[in-house]
Structure formats: C-alpha cells, structure tokens
Amino acid sequence: GQNIDQPTEMTATEGAIVQINCTYQTSGFNGLFWYQQHAGEAPTFLSYNVLDGLEEKGRFSSFLSRSKGYSYLLLKELQMKDSASYLCAVRDQDYKLSFGAGTTVTVRA
Amino acid sequence: IAGITQAPTSQILAAGRRMTLRCTQDMRHNAMYWYRQDLGLGLRLIHYSNTAGTTGKGEVPDGYSVSRANTDDFPLTLASAVPSQTSVYFCASSARGSTDTQYFGPGTRLTVL
C-alpha cells in the first residue's frame, strides 16, 4: 500500500508563493499526481510527475524526487481563486491512485 | 459536453435501505473508479474496473458492490446502508494510457440516518 503525508493547512498572502510538500512510502511507484479541489466540488487534475525533476505549468510547478519519496507543488503569484484543497496522489503498478488527506490553502488579501 | 455524470446529487437514506449511485461517462475511457471522501481521510478507493466486464476491490470495499456491464456505466450499490457510509462519493474514469489522468464526476453526497 501507500503512506502519503502532506500538511493539513497553509495560509499565504495574495501574490505570494506557497510550497506544499508531499512525502510518500510506496510498495510500487508509477507516478505522482496533484489535484486541486475547491470546496463542494470535484478534484481537478493539476500536474503529473513520473521522472525526477520539475514540471512547470504556468503559475503551478511540481517537483519529484523518487529516491527521497518526496514531491512538492509550488503555487506562484497566488490569487484568491487558488484557495482550495490540494491533493497529492501516488499511482501504483496497477494504475490505482492512493491519495493524501489534502492540504487546505487559504489565500488572504 | 464530454465528461462524467453522477446521480443523484445528494440523498438522505434510512439505515438498512438499498441504494444505487449512478455514474456515466462519455469519454470512452476503459477504467472507472469509485471513491469516498471523508473529512480528514481524503479520497479512498472503494472499487474499480479496468475494462468493461471486470471489477476489482479497492481499499474500502466492504458494504459496497459494483458492476461494469458496458464501457460507459459503473453503478455503485449499497446493499444495506449503515450510518458509517455517510460520505461524499466520487466516480472517476481514465483512459489507462501512460499519463492515465483520472477525471472526476461532480460527486454524490449521501447521508445515512
């Protein structure tokens, strides 16, 4: 199985940068995903890493280190609409996802 | 618009009743999944199906059953609902390619009294 840890809550100011860390222990790693979930809505896909390194997509970037069992999601130039939960998910060899409990990010004016 | 639909949006159910949550996708995705989401626990996989005609158990399958008669539909049945099954249920699908991004439906909020 998978053991996935991420902080419960983070608060940041509009325009700032926030980094959400995710550590995992896995019995078979086949990729790491980040999802965004606004309150009362479905999770939506943000990023995918399967090789070590940084993947950049606009204001969002995701980093992976497989040897350390570590990933982070970087949110730059924070906007009020970025207030949401961010879910780290690890995929196993059978293509099943295991999710962390999520990190709630609150952006303040 | 292509995507995943779930029904009902919300439901209040008496304990002991049978309930089927519906999920339909029109993206021709091979794989479909059912999750429940509870505060502080995140999304947990209940059952999944890699292709029509096959199903598998996830992390928390007890009390739930699924079927996959065709590519588009993946209903989740609670044979005899209990209060611990109060949760938000999300259906998801993926194409099972190398990126294999899962796309989620809008969810069903179920309350069992």
Image (cartoon, rainbow, N blue to C red):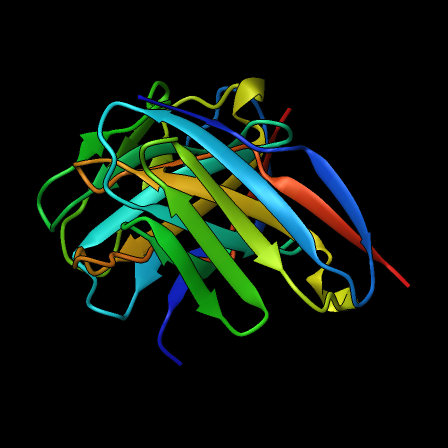
Question: Which of B60 and A29 lies nearest the eye of the viewer?
Answer: A29
Q: At 73% from the left edge and 37% from the top edge, which residue is drawn? A: A9
Q: Is residue B35 left or right of residue A26?
A: right
Q: Is residue B106 left or right of residue B52?
A: right
Residue A48's place in the image compared with A5, above or below, is below
Q: At 31% from the left edge and 58% from the top edge, which residue is drawn? A: B101
Question: Which of A10 and B110 lies nearest the eye of the viewer?
Answer: A10
Query: Residue A74 lies in what quarter of the image?
Result: bottom right
Quarter of the rendering occupied by the C terminus of chain A: bottom right
Q: At 35% from the left edge and 76% from the top edge, which residue is drawn? A: B2
In percent of width and height, residue B54 lies at 10, 40
Residue B47's place in the image compared with A38, above or below, is above
In percent of width and height, residue B95 lies at 20, 61
Q: Is residue B30 left or right of residue B41?
A: left
Query: Residue A92 lies in what quarter of the image?
Result: top left
Residue furthest to the left in view is: B53
Look at the image and tell me whether residue B21 can be seen. no
Look at the image and tell me whether residue B113 can be seen. yes
Question: Which of A13 and B108 lies nearest the eye of the viewer?
Answer: A13
Quarter of the rendering occupied by the N terminus of chain A: top left
Q: Is residue B109 left or right of residue A83?
A: left
In percent of width and height, residue B102 lies at 34, 55
Residue furthest to the bottom in view is: B1
In percent of width and height, residue B22 lies at 38, 50
